[in-house]
């Protein structure tokens, strides 16, 4: 091999080595192996909390905090393990309990060999002993537990630990170690959060995961001035550790209402909804409702992550002036399952026989991908014939909904009526359709909000005229 390498390639290789030594790019390091350390090599989060109380409080109750004890994960991983004769045990655990894996405590999967620290999910003294990575996807992290804590500052001093700067912490590639899941046998990309970000305009504009998920902004960087620890200097920006996505289900189950509220706020900032309805329709004629949904705020698809389990859909409800239902789509039936939605915005994975499956460890293909890409707009149309026996005007209510999983998936795993998966409205629009014989000046919106607004505007106008006299 060697003699075939020409002089040109040698210079090229030398250049690459020089560039990687002197540029800010993280040099690839070898991924830490199963059982390379013991759980005693890692510090409990209670130690970090002594000086980093604010950061601790932000992290507590988030999905990183829950990554191992999440009951949905624990149930699914049992099924995955049974389906694969235990082949996935170490694989799944690598992101959900990284200390459990690098300390060799998992497998067995039942937790019987685990120390308390391994059960603390994705935690302080795991994330801050990451000293390098071998790219992204399937958790290729190198960890060096001990006295040094790696982070985003190049001038940081602490009495308890040494500090080391690593640019990786400020880059999406850090998150991309775990937020990209590739099927270990057939190479199917199951969680493509990092790759979709990488292909988006956000990556082009250097808007990193941390800018939206670790600052005061939800859709862009917004500084959070403060101190990173007791006795630390005041800085222009300290990253927030309340890293949330759309998961409301698990935080509510664990009583972390503050985390659930942040997830709801995030969901309500991720998409816009524009609905076009005709102003008038005569009975017996067709009503056509058009909805345009734009992923305006997320730096990746909505939904993303385990998006074959997540559900986003449009709920449409048309009633007449007496509240009689005329048309509906995307409402929940008595079992909590979605009825007649036009589209469910997620993706459908298929197994080797081409059958749809939610069990991504069995998947080897994508059957359908209806997720909404970053900045992408999709439209859906609802049409029906307006029946004769209705009372005008009609009220059209639309809501873009999100939930973490179908109700039947949760019922199947935990039993009927054990856990209700909360449905979050990401955006709502209402409009009115009138009788064509109503004169245009009488077509005032009948929704109470608008009437109150109109009434108070009239009052202001009257008062204004009164004072001018
Ligand atoms: C998922 C991994 C992750 C977890 C868990 C995590 N951190 Fe961080 N932390 C980061 C990243 C990434 C940054 C840098 C973000 C940036 O600057 O863009 C950071 C920054 C910091 C900083 C520097 C100051 C700041 O806020 O910018 C401190 C101190 C810190 N973390 C302490 C902690 C403590 C204490 C815990 C546990 C309560 C913790 N971290 C949990 C990833 C993590
Ligand atoms: C005795 C108090 C104390 C304890 C205990 C402590 N830290 Fe710190 N830590 C500090 C101070 C002070 C800073 C400096 C912050 C600054 O520079 O703004 C700091 C900085 C950091 C940084 C930033 C490093 C950098 O270069 O970006 C990280 C990460 C960090 N600590 C993680 C941890 C973790 C993880 C634990 C628990 C294992 C921990 N700390 C325990 C006081 C402490
Ligand atoms: C060691 C692996 C690991 C790293 C590194 C990591 N995460 Fe995570 N993250 C996870 C796991 C595992 C979960 C999900 C736990 C669950 O749902 O049971 C998660 C959950 C999340 C969620 C919540 C998702 C939801 O549905 O609400 C967000 C948001 C998130 N991570 C963002 C980030 C960002 C941003 C970074 C980089 C600063 C990062 N993560 C780094 C493993 C990691
Ligand atoms: C431009 C801002 C922005 C950027 C950049 C961004 N996110 Fe998000 N992220 C959001 C918003 C808004 C949501 C809520 C919508 C949702 O849940 O899909 C979200 C949701 C999530 C979720 C929950 C997914 C779901 O659908 O349930 C995860 C996980 C996540 N982000 C991880 C990441 C990671 C990892 C990166 C970097 C590779 C990243 N995000 C970059 C704004 C951003
Ligand atoms: C490379 C890292 C990684 C591996 C490997 C991994 N996961 Fe995850 N898992 C994640 C991340 C990141 C999330 C959060 C994504 C989101 O919320 O959108 C997650 C979320 C989940 C969830 C959703 C939890 C919830 O509360 O909504 C389940 C269930 C799950 N994983 C099961 C598994 C199983 C089973 C395996 C093995 C077959 C596995 N994971 C392997 C990173 C990983």
Image: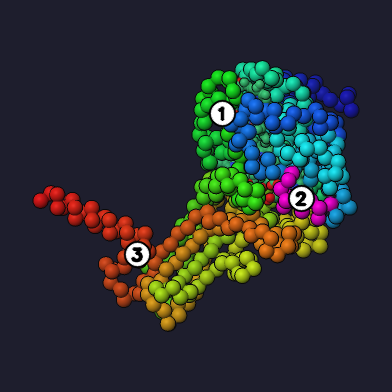
- The residue drawn where x is 60% and y is 63% is 343
Is 160 situated above or below 434? above
The quadrant in which the N terminus is found is top right
Is 306 situated left or right of 394 in this image? right
- Compared to 279, does 200 lie above or below? above
Sequence order check, earlier mark of 3 and 1: 1
Ligand 1 closer than 8 Å to label 1 CB:
yes
Mark 1 surroundings: few (<14), some (14-19) or many (≥20) residues within 10 A? some
- Residue numbers of the magenta segment: 68-81
In the depicted view, which residue is nearer to us: 332 or 355?
A: 332
Q: Residue at x 85, y 56 (%)?
A: 83
Q: Is mark 2 within 8 Å of ligand 5?
A: no
- Nearer to us: label 3 or label 2: 2
The reply to whether the magenta stretch includes residue 75 is yes
* Secondary structure under the numbered disc 2 in the rendered image: helix
Residue 402 in the image: state x and y as whole percent: 58, 56
Q: Is residue 78 visible?
A: yes
Give the label on residue 74, or none: 2
Q: Position of residue 46 (x, y in %)?
A: 69, 31
Instruction: Say if mark 3 contacts mark 2, CB within 8 Å.
Output: no
Location of mark 1 (residue): 238
Horizontal side, residue 431 vs residue 74: left or right? left
Q: Residue 259 in the image: x percent, y percent?
A: 59, 44
Q: Earlier in the sequence, mark 3 or mark 2?
A: 2
Rendered residue at 88%/24% (across/down): 2
Give the Cα distance between marks 3 and 1.
47 Å
Tell me, for residue 445, which label it has, or none: 3
Q: How far separated are the C-alphas under marks 3 and 2?
A: 50 Å
Measured Cα–Cα span from mark 1 to mark 2: 33 Å
């Amino acid at each position: 091999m060697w003699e075939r390498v020409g002089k040109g390639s040698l210079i090229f290789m030398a250049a690459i080595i020089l560039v990687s030594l002197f540029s800010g790019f993280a040099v690839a390091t070898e991924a830490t192996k199963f059982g390379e350390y013991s759980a005693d090599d890692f510090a409990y989060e209670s130690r970090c909390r002594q000086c980093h109380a604010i950061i601790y409080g932000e992290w507590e109750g988030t999905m990183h905090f829950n990554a191992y004890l999440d009951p949905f994960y624990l149930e699914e991983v049992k099924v995955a393990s049974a389906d694969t004769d235990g082949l996935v045990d170490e694989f799944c655990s690598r992101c959900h309990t990284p200390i459990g894996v690098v300390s060799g405590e998992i497998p067995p999967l039942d937790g019987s060999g685990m120390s308390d620290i391994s059960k603390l999910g994705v935690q302080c003294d795991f994330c801050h002993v990451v000293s390098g990575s071998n790219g992204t996807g399937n958790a290729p992290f190198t960890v060096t537990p001990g006295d040094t804590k790696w982070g985003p500052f190049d001038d940081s001093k602490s009495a308890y630990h040494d500090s080391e700067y690593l640019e990786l912490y400020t880059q999406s590639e850090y998150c991309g170690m775990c937020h990209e899941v590739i099927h270990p046998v057939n190479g199917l990309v199951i969680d493509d959060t990092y790759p979709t970000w990488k292909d988006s305009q956000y990556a082009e504009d250097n808007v990193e995961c941390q800018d939206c998920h670790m600052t005061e902004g939800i859709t862009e960087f917004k500084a959070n001035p403060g101190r990173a620890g007791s006795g630390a200097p005041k800085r222009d920006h300290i990253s927030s550790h309340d890293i949330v996505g759309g998961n409301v289900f698990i935080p509510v189950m664990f009583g972390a209402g503050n985390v659930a509220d942040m997830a709801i706020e995030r969901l309500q900032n991720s998409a816009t909804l524009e609905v076009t309805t005709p102003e008038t329709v005569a009975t017996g004629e067709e009503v056509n409702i058009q909805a345009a949904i734009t992923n305006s705020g997320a730096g990746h698809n909505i939904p993303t992550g385990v998006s074959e389990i997540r559900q986003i859909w449009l709920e449409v409800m048309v009633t007449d002036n007496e509240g009689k239902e005329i048309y509906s789509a995307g409402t929940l039936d008595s079992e909590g399952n979605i009825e007649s939605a036009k589209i469910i915005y997620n993706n459908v994975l298929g197994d080797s026989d081409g059958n749809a499956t939610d069990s991504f460890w069995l998947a080897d293909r994508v059957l359908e991908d209806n997720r909404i890409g970053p900045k992408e707009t999709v439209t859906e149309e609802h049409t029906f014939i307006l029946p004769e026996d209705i009372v005008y005007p009609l009220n059209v209510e639309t809501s873009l909904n999100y939930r973490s999983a179908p109700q039947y998936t949760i019922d199947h795993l935990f039993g009927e009526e054990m856990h209700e998966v909360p449905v979050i409205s990401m955006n709502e629009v209402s409009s009115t359709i009138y009788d064509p014989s109503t004169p245009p000046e009488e077509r005032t919106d009948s929704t109470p909000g608008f009437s109150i607004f109109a009434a108070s505007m009239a009052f202001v106008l009257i008062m204004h005229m009164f004072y001018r006299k």
